[in-house]
Amino acid sequence: MRTEIATLGEFGLIHHLTESIKLKNESSRYGVGDDAAVLSYSAEKEVLVTTDLLMEGVHFDLVYVPLKHLGYKSAVVNFSDIYAMNGTPKQITVSLGISKRFSIEDMEELYTGIRLACEEYDVDIVGGDTSASYTGLTISITCIGEGEKGKVVYRNGARVTDLICVSGNLGAAYMGLQLLEREKAVLKGGDKDLQPDFSGKEYLLERQLKPEARRDIIQKLAEEGIQPTSMMDISDGLSSELLHICTQSKVGCRVYEEHIPIDYQTAVMAEEFNMNLSTCALNGGEDYELLFTVPIADHEKVAEMEGVKLIGHITKPELGCALITRDGQEFELKAQGWNPLKEEEAEKA
Protein backbone atom coordinates (compact mmCIF):
# COMPACT_ATOMS: atom_id res chain seq x y z
CA MET A 1 0.00 0.00 0.00
CA ARG A 2 1.25 3.47 -0.87
CA THR A 3 -0.31 6.73 0.32
CA GLU A 4 0.91 9.99 -1.23
CA ILE A 5 2.22 12.50 1.31
CA ALA A 6 0.19 15.22 -0.40
CA THR A 7 -3.00 13.61 0.96
CA LEU A 8 -2.01 14.75 4.47
CA GLY A 9 -0.01 17.90 3.74
CA GLU A 10 2.92 19.17 5.84
CA PHE A 11 1.11 19.72 9.14
CA GLY A 12 -0.99 16.62 8.70
CA LEU A 13 2.15 14.53 8.20
CA ILE A 14 3.84 15.96 11.30
CA HIS A 15 0.72 15.31 13.36
CA HIS A 16 0.40 11.78 11.95
CA LEU A 17 4.03 10.93 12.80
CA THR A 18 4.09 12.51 16.28
CA GLU A 19 0.54 12.24 17.69
CA SER A 20 1.30 9.35 20.07
CA ILE A 21 4.57 10.73 21.47
CA LYS A 22 4.69 10.86 25.28
CA LEU A 23 7.34 12.99 27.00
CA LYS A 24 9.31 11.31 29.79
CA ASN A 25 12.16 13.69 30.70
CA GLU A 26 11.55 16.25 33.43
CA SER A 27 13.40 18.87 31.37
CA SER A 28 10.86 18.43 28.52
CA ARG A 29 8.06 20.79 29.58
CA TYR A 30 6.21 21.01 26.26
CA GLY A 31 6.91 19.18 22.99
CA VAL A 32 5.34 18.89 19.54
CA GLY A 33 2.23 20.97 18.84
CA ASP A 34 3.16 24.63 19.26
CA ASP A 35 5.51 27.16 17.66
CA ALA A 36 8.39 25.97 19.85
CA ALA A 37 9.18 23.30 22.41
CA VAL A 38 9.63 24.36 26.04
CA LEU A 39 12.59 22.94 27.96
CA SER A 40 13.67 23.59 31.53
CA TYR A 41 17.14 22.72 32.84
CA SER A 42 18.36 23.23 36.41
CA ALA A 43 21.13 25.72 37.23
CA GLU A 44 23.51 22.85 38.10
CA LYS A 45 23.45 21.59 34.51
CA GLU A 46 25.19 22.71 31.34
CA VAL A 47 22.95 22.50 28.25
CA LEU A 48 24.56 20.70 25.29
CA VAL A 49 23.32 21.09 21.70
CA THR A 50 24.44 19.21 18.57
CA THR A 51 23.02 18.82 15.08
CA ASP A 52 23.60 16.48 12.13
CA LEU A 53 22.53 16.79 8.51
CA LEU A 54 22.25 13.57 6.49
CA MET A 55 21.68 13.73 2.74
CA GLU A 56 20.68 10.89 0.43
CA GLY A 57 23.45 10.06 -2.00
CA VAL A 58 26.08 11.64 0.25
CA HIS A 59 25.61 10.09 3.71
CA PHE A 60 23.38 7.12 2.92
CA ASP A 61 22.22 4.93 0.03
CA LEU A 62 18.65 3.66 0.16
CA VAL A 63 19.54 0.79 -2.19
CA TYR A 64 20.79 -1.08 0.89
CA VAL A 65 19.84 1.06 3.92
CA PRO A 66 16.33 0.22 5.24
CA LEU A 67 14.40 3.34 6.30
CA LYS A 68 13.84 1.99 9.81
CA HIS A 69 17.59 1.49 10.28
CA LEU A 70 18.24 4.92 8.80
CA GLY A 71 15.90 6.52 11.34
CA TYR A 72 17.57 4.69 14.22
CA LYS A 73 21.07 5.61 13.05
CA SER A 74 20.13 9.26 12.40
CA ALA A 75 19.08 9.64 16.03
CA VAL A 76 21.91 7.59 17.58
CA VAL A 77 24.73 9.53 15.87
CA ASN A 78 23.39 12.67 17.57
CA PHE A 79 23.16 10.94 20.96
CA SER A 80 26.78 9.86 20.46
CA ASP A 81 27.88 13.52 20.14
CA ILE A 82 26.28 14.35 23.50
CA TYR A 83 27.87 11.32 25.22
CA ALA A 84 31.20 12.41 23.71
CA MET A 85 30.92 15.60 25.80
CA ASN A 86 30.36 13.43 28.90
CA GLY A 87 26.69 14.41 28.81
CA THR A 88 23.27 12.76 28.57
CA PRO A 89 20.95 13.30 25.56
CA LYS A 90 17.43 14.40 26.56
CA GLN A 91 15.54 15.81 23.55
CA ILE A 92 15.68 15.84 19.75
CA THR A 93 13.98 17.76 16.97
CA VAL A 94 13.57 16.05 13.60
CA SER A 95 13.40 17.92 10.28
CA LEU A 96 12.87 16.13 6.96
CA GLY A 97 13.20 17.14 3.33
CA ILE A 98 11.07 14.64 1.38
CA SER A 99 10.84 14.09 -2.38
CA LYS A 100 7.69 12.87 -4.15
CA ARG A 101 8.94 9.32 -4.48
CA PHE A 102 8.39 8.75 -0.74
CA SER A 103 5.01 7.77 0.69
CA ILE A 104 3.41 8.22 4.11
CA GLU A 105 4.26 4.57 4.81
CA ASP A 106 7.93 5.27 4.08
CA MET A 107 7.96 8.13 6.58
CA GLU A 108 6.22 5.96 9.17
CA GLU A 109 9.04 3.42 8.74
CA LEU A 110 11.71 6.12 9.16
CA TYR A 111 9.99 7.51 12.26
CA THR A 112 9.64 4.01 13.74
CA GLY A 113 13.44 3.78 13.74
CA ILE A 114 13.83 7.26 15.25
CA ARG A 115 11.33 6.46 17.99
CA LEU A 116 12.98 3.11 18.74
CA ALA A 117 16.28 4.92 19.31
CA CYS A 118 14.57 7.47 21.54
CA GLU A 119 12.95 4.73 23.62
CA GLU A 120 16.26 2.89 23.96
CA TYR A 121 18.15 5.99 25.12
CA ASP A 122 15.33 7.76 27.03
CA VAL A 123 15.18 10.77 24.71
CA ASP A 124 12.09 12.87 23.88
CA ILE A 125 11.08 14.02 20.39
CA VAL A 126 9.99 17.64 21.02
CA GLY A 127 9.66 19.15 17.56
CA GLY A 128 10.72 19.33 13.95
CA ASP A 129 9.65 20.28 10.45
CA THR A 130 9.02 18.81 7.00
CA SER A 131 9.53 20.27 3.54
CA ALA A 132 9.38 19.18 -0.08
CA SER A 133 12.77 18.23 -1.52
CA TYR A 134 14.00 17.98 -5.12
CA THR A 135 17.09 15.98 -4.18
CA GLY A 136 15.77 12.87 -2.46
CA LEU A 137 15.63 12.51 1.32
CA THR A 138 17.31 14.93 3.74
CA ILE A 139 17.32 14.36 7.50
CA SER A 140 18.36 17.02 10.00
CA ILE A 141 18.30 16.12 13.68
CA THR A 142 19.17 18.44 16.55
CA CYS A 143 19.84 16.89 19.93
CA ILE A 144 19.76 18.70 23.27
CA GLY A 145 21.38 17.17 26.33
CA GLU A 146 22.74 17.99 29.74
CA GLY A 147 26.08 17.74 31.47
CA GLU A 148 27.10 18.22 35.10
CA LYS A 149 28.73 21.61 35.64
CA GLY A 150 32.49 21.14 35.75
CA LYS A 151 32.28 17.64 34.21
CA VAL A 152 31.61 18.44 30.55
CA VAL A 153 34.57 17.16 28.48
CA TYR A 154 35.98 19.04 25.48
CA ARG A 155 38.50 18.22 22.76
CA ASN A 156 41.06 20.72 24.04
CA GLY A 157 41.92 19.27 27.46
CA ALA A 158 44.52 16.58 26.65
CA ARG A 159 47.81 17.06 28.50
CA VAL A 160 51.33 15.63 28.09
CA THR A 161 51.60 12.09 29.62
CA ASP A 162 47.81 11.54 29.41
CA LEU A 163 46.82 8.05 28.24
CA ILE A 164 44.86 7.64 24.99
CA CYS A 165 41.91 5.25 25.25
CA VAL A 166 39.30 3.95 22.82
CA SER A 167 36.11 1.97 23.43
CA GLY A 168 34.99 -1.13 21.53
CA ASN A 169 36.74 -1.98 18.26
CA LEU A 170 37.45 -0.08 15.07
CA GLY A 171 36.99 -0.60 11.34
CA ALA A 172 33.89 -2.82 11.52
CA ALA A 173 31.43 -0.18 10.23
CA TYR A 174 33.74 0.61 7.30
CA MET A 175 34.03 -3.05 6.35
CA GLY A 176 30.24 -3.35 6.59
CA LEU A 177 29.97 -0.48 4.11
CA GLN A 178 32.46 -2.14 1.73
CA LEU A 179 30.43 -5.34 1.88
CA LEU A 180 27.17 -3.53 1.08
CA GLU A 181 28.77 -1.59 -1.76
CA ARG A 182 30.19 -4.79 -3.24
CA GLU A 183 26.81 -6.53 -3.23
CA LYS A 184 25.19 -3.42 -4.75
CA ALA A 185 27.71 -3.55 -7.59
CA VAL A 186 26.97 -7.25 -8.15
CA LEU A 187 23.23 -6.52 -8.40
CA LYS A 188 23.92 -3.67 -10.83
CA GLY A 189 25.78 -6.21 -12.93
CA GLY A 190 22.49 -7.59 -14.15
CA ASP A 191 21.53 -10.84 -12.38
CA LYS A 192 18.38 -9.78 -10.55
CA ASP A 193 17.83 -13.27 -9.13
CA LEU A 194 21.16 -13.25 -7.35
CA GLN A 195 20.70 -12.83 -3.60
CA PRO A 196 23.42 -11.27 -1.41
CA ASP A 197 25.07 -13.71 0.99
CA PHE A 198 25.78 -11.97 4.29
CA SER A 199 26.03 -15.09 6.47
CA GLY A 200 28.80 -14.82 9.05
CA LYS A 201 29.08 -11.09 8.42
CA GLU A 202 26.09 -9.90 10.45
CA TYR A 203 28.23 -8.02 12.97
CA LEU A 204 29.80 -5.86 10.26
CA LEU A 205 26.41 -5.01 8.78
CA GLU A 206 25.00 -4.13 12.19
CA ARG A 207 27.92 -1.79 12.91
CA GLN A 208 27.22 0.04 9.65
CA LEU A 209 23.41 -0.01 9.59
CA LYS A 210 22.54 0.09 13.31
CA PRO A 211 25.34 1.65 15.36
CA GLU A 212 24.95 2.26 19.08
CA ALA A 213 26.13 5.22 21.16
CA ARG A 214 28.46 4.29 24.04
CA ARG A 215 26.32 5.35 26.98
CA ASP A 216 27.67 2.34 28.88
CA ILE A 217 31.25 3.65 28.72
CA ILE A 218 30.20 7.08 30.03
CA GLN A 219 28.41 5.35 32.92
CA LYS A 220 31.47 3.17 33.69
CA LEU A 221 33.78 6.20 33.72
CA ALA A 222 31.46 7.95 36.19
CA GLU A 223 31.24 4.85 38.39
CA GLU A 224 35.05 4.58 38.49
CA GLY A 225 35.42 8.29 39.23
CA ILE A 226 37.41 8.87 36.04
CA GLN A 227 37.14 12.34 34.51
CA PRO A 228 38.50 12.28 30.92
CA THR A 229 40.67 15.26 30.00
CA SER A 230 39.45 15.22 26.37
CA MET A 231 36.96 13.16 24.39
CA MET A 232 35.15 12.82 21.09
CA ASP A 233 33.29 10.11 19.20
CA ILE A 234 34.81 8.36 16.19
CA SER A 235 32.67 9.29 13.20
CA ASP A 236 35.38 10.16 10.62
CA GLY A 237 38.12 7.72 11.65
CA LEU A 238 40.50 7.35 14.60
CA SER A 239 43.37 9.24 12.96
CA SER A 240 41.17 12.26 12.08
CA GLU A 241 39.62 12.45 15.54
CA LEU A 242 42.93 12.03 17.36
CA LEU A 243 44.45 14.83 15.28
CA HIS A 244 41.46 17.04 16.22
CA ILE A 245 42.20 16.42 19.91
CA CYS A 246 45.94 17.02 19.49
CA THR A 247 45.44 20.19 17.45
CA GLN A 248 42.93 21.68 19.85
CA SER A 249 44.91 20.60 22.93
CA LYS A 250 48.22 21.78 21.37
CA VAL A 251 49.94 18.43 22.04
CA GLY A 252 51.46 15.50 20.14
CA CYS A 253 50.73 11.77 20.47
CA ARG A 254 52.05 8.27 20.01
CA VAL A 255 49.59 5.52 19.03
CA TYR A 256 50.64 1.88 18.90
CA GLU A 257 49.36 -0.19 15.99
CA GLU A 258 49.42 -3.42 18.01
CA HIS A 259 47.02 -1.97 20.60
CA ILE A 260 44.30 -0.76 18.19
CA PRO A 261 41.26 -2.99 18.91
CA ILE A 262 39.97 -4.85 15.85
CA ASP A 263 37.23 -7.49 15.66
CA TYR A 264 37.95 -10.86 14.04
CA GLN A 265 35.24 -10.39 11.37
CA THR A 266 36.79 -7.04 10.42
CA ALA A 267 40.17 -8.73 9.93
CA VAL A 268 38.69 -11.51 7.79
CA MET A 269 36.80 -9.01 5.62
CA ALA A 270 39.84 -6.77 5.15
CA GLU A 271 41.82 -9.78 3.92
CA GLU A 272 38.98 -10.72 1.54
CA PHE A 273 39.04 -7.18 0.09
CA ASN A 274 42.86 -7.13 0.06
CA MET A 275 42.86 -4.01 2.27
CA ASN A 276 45.37 -3.01 4.93
CA LEU A 277 43.69 -3.79 8.25
CA SER A 278 45.30 -1.00 10.26
CA THR A 279 44.41 1.56 7.57
CA CYS A 280 40.75 0.47 7.80
CA ALA A 281 40.78 0.78 11.59
CA LEU A 282 42.53 4.17 11.55
CA ASN A 283 40.55 5.81 8.77
CA GLY A 284 37.28 3.91 8.28
CA GLY A 285 34.93 6.00 10.42
CA GLU A 286 31.30 5.56 11.49
CA ASP A 287 32.25 3.31 14.44
CA TYR A 288 30.79 5.84 16.93
CA GLU A 289 33.15 4.53 19.57
CA LEU A 290 34.58 6.96 22.14
CA LEU A 291 38.14 8.25 21.90
CA PHE A 292 39.31 9.87 25.14
CA THR A 293 42.35 10.78 27.19
CA VAL A 294 42.79 10.30 30.94
CA PRO A 295 45.50 11.33 33.42
CA ILE A 296 48.27 8.75 33.85
CA ALA A 297 47.19 8.38 37.50
CA ASP A 298 44.07 6.56 36.23
CA HIS A 299 46.14 3.94 34.39
CA GLU A 300 45.16 1.04 36.62
CA LYS A 301 41.44 1.87 36.50
CA VAL A 302 41.19 2.17 32.70
CA ALA A 303 43.47 -0.82 32.11
CA GLU A 304 40.96 -3.00 33.96
CA MET A 305 37.85 -1.44 32.41
CA GLU A 306 35.93 -3.85 30.16
CA GLY A 307 35.34 -2.52 26.65
CA VAL A 308 38.18 0.04 26.84
CA LYS A 309 41.65 -0.28 25.31
CA LEU A 310 44.76 1.81 25.98
CA ILE A 311 46.27 2.61 22.58
CA GLY A 312 48.92 5.26 23.29
CA HIS A 313 49.86 8.44 25.11
CA ILE A 314 49.99 12.21 24.69
CA THR A 315 53.41 13.81 24.08
CA LYS A 316 54.89 17.28 23.76
CA PRO A 317 53.69 19.12 20.63
CA GLU A 318 57.15 19.30 19.05
CA LEU A 319 57.23 15.48 18.85
CA GLY A 320 54.24 15.55 16.49
CA CYS A 321 51.58 12.86 16.05
CA ALA A 322 52.81 9.40 15.10
CA LEU A 323 51.76 5.78 14.67
CA ILE A 324 54.24 3.20 15.99
CA THR A 325 53.96 0.07 13.83
CA ARG A 326 54.20 -3.50 15.07
CA ASP A 327 57.86 -3.63 14.01
CA GLY A 328 58.72 -0.40 15.84
CA GLN A 329 58.73 2.01 12.91
CA GLU A 330 57.31 5.49 13.37
CA PHE A 331 55.00 7.11 10.79
CA GLU A 332 53.34 10.49 10.85
CA LEU A 333 49.65 10.17 11.66
CA LYS A 334 47.55 11.61 8.83
CA ALA A 335 43.84 12.40 8.66
CA GLN A 336 42.55 10.20 5.86
CA GLY A 337 39.02 9.77 7.14
CA TRP A 338 35.95 10.43 4.98
CA ASN A 339 35.35 14.06 4.03
CA PRO A 340 32.13 14.65 2.02
CA LEU A 341 33.25 18.11 0.86
CA LYS A 342 36.56 16.71 -0.41
CA GLU A 343 34.68 13.91 -2.22
CA GLU A 344 32.53 16.52 -3.98
CA GLU A 345 35.60 18.45 -5.14
CA ALA A 346 37.18 15.25 -6.46
CA GLU A 347 34.06 14.52 -8.53
CA LYS A 348 34.19 18.01 -10.08
CA ALA A 349 37.87 17.70 -11.01
Image (cartoon, grey):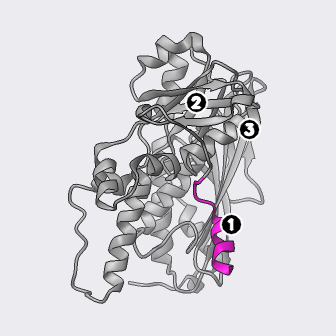
- Work out whether residue 14 or residue 286 is closer to the camera in this orientation and state it: 286
**Amino acid type for the residue under numbered disc 3:** Thr
The residue located at (43%, 31%) in the rendering is 259
In which quarter of the view is residue 253 placed?
top right
Query: Whole-Å distance between the Cαs marked 1 and 3?
Result: 21 Å
Quadrant of the image for the C terminus? bottom right
| Magenta segment boundaries in residue numbering | 336-349
- Work out whether residue 173 or residue 206 is closer to the camera in this orientation and state it: 173
Q: Secondary structure at mark 2?
A: strand
Horizontal arrangement in the rendering, residue 84 relative to residue 209 (left or right): right
Extreme residue in the bottom direction: 190
Q: Secondary structure at mark 3?
A: helix
The residue located at (48%, 63%) in the rendering is 70
The reply to whether residue 113 is in sight is yes
Task: Tell me, yes or no, whether the highlighted magenta stretch contains residue 337.
Answer: yes
Q: Do residues under tags 1 and 3 come within 8 Å of each other at their CB atoms? A: no
The residue located at (45%, 45%) in the rendering is 212
Q: Secondary structure at mark 1?
A: helix
Q: Position of residue 302 (x, y in %)?
A: 48, 19
In which quarter of the view is residue 243 placed?
top right
Q: Position of residue 260 (x, y in %)?
A: 44, 36
Q: Main secondary structure of the magenta part?
A: helix
Disc sitting over residue 341 in the figure: 1
Q: Is residue 109 above or below residue 167?
A: below
**Amino acid type for the residue under numbered disc 2:** Arg
Query: Whole-Å distance between the Cαs marked 3 and 2?
Result: 14 Å
The residue located at (41%, 17%) in the rendering is 304
Q: Position of residue 306 (x, y in %)?
A: 39, 24
Disc sitting over residue 254 in the figure: 2
The reply to whether residue 41 is in sight is no
Q: How many marks?
A: 3
Q: Which residue is mark 3?
A: 247
